[in-house]
Image: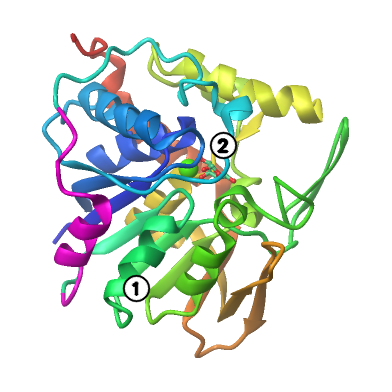
Amino acid sequence: MPQKLIIDTDPGVDDMVAILAALRAEDIDLIALTTVGGNVGIETTTANALRILARGGSPELPVHPGLAGAHTAAHVHGDDGLSGCPWPPSNHPAQPEHAVDYLARTLPNTDITLACLGPLTNIAAVLEIHPNLTNNLVLMGGGFGSYRFQAQNGIIESTGNVTPEAEFNIYSDIPAAQAVFASKLNITVIPLDISQRTLLTPQRLQQMPIDIAPILDRYTGFSRQKWGHHSGPLHDPNVIARIAEPDLYNGLRGTVTVTESGQTQLAPDPNGPHHVMLQVDAGGYLDWVTEQLQPLAGTATPTP
Ligand code: RIB
Ligand code: CA
């Protein structure tokens, strides 16, 4: 039985790949997107979510706009949030129901899984309404320092990518992250320890659909320029792959807390409420992502 999934997202180039992969993954039934301000402002992340669904052949899937964010990463994803994506605006509108109201109405007492690809602002707001939610939640965020990589321009640490100790999704709304990890949600974490190992190489880029490869090339260009490395991390699709192909990942259970500076800390505990992924079959992951996107290779970009 495919897993019912809602993706909370701030598209975002890597979010775009995650959403397109979720539309195709056979073990996933994507029922809606909720948007949050993050990589770019909430209006743009919402418009991008609609554009991505149109490109993925599911323009009718509901998109519920959510809360604004405090920071952006336009220097990584471009001012449009999709690194100069040529796709036209969708002719499907966003839903009138706010993301927080939609999630508060839809999640309780269900086995719907939540995939969180951006700041946790919406989720913390839902917990204000329903503090005892116990849904499965898989999020991209945080960093636990298990990975160091000597790039040409410096050492890449898996503790943070906004500051040395804070990752963007956590840093962008630290109180929200603290509330989510203090809740009863059953959380699986995909931190930088994973996503910095899953690098889009130039060879991998060539396997991507012809209109998506240039977007990814511009997105990874930020990492190439900053670190002098030939590739860039494909963060968010790891969340979808962990749901569809859990055997690609391995990690530790425990309790995650978030410091006032946005650092995520893990107290190992085999019976803990949080499952932090620390090992990944990076080749298997990139093969999986490439496979999910292949059906798009032959399809044209959406007509307005
Ligand atoms: O730190 C990486 C995360 O921040 C990814 O989700 C990326 O899309 C940005 O939101
Ligand atoms: Ca994201």
Callout 1 amino acid = Glu
**Nearer to the camera, 289 or 71:** 71
Disc 1 is placed on an element classified as helix
Residue 129 image offset from top left, x and y in percent: 27, 73
Q: Is mark 2 within 8 Å of ligand 1?
A: no
Q: Is residue 94 above or below residue 250?
A: above
Q: Spatial distance from mark 1 to mark 2, Cα to Cα?
A: 25 Å
In the rendered image, the quadrant that contains the C terminus is: top left
Mark 1 or mark 2, which has the lower sequence index? 2
Q: Quadrant of ligand 1?
A: top right
Q: Residue at x 20, y 59 (%)?
A: 101
Left/right placement of residue 207 relative to residue 67 reads right
Disc 2 is placed on an element classified as loop
Residue 108 sits inside the magenta stretch: yes
| Mark identifier at residue 196 | none
Mark 2, residue position: 72
What is the basis of the colouring in this image? rainbow
Callout 2 amino acid = Thr
Q: Residue at x 25, y 22 (%)?
A: 55
Please provide the residue range marked out in magenta.
Answer: 93-109
Quarter occupied by residue 290: top left
Residue 64 image offset from top left, x and y in percent: 22, 44
The answer to whether any part of residue 3 appears in the image is no
Q: How many marks?
A: 2
| Mark identifier at residue 128 | 1
Q: Is residue 261 above or below residue 153?
A: below
Residue 154 sits inside the magenta stretch: no
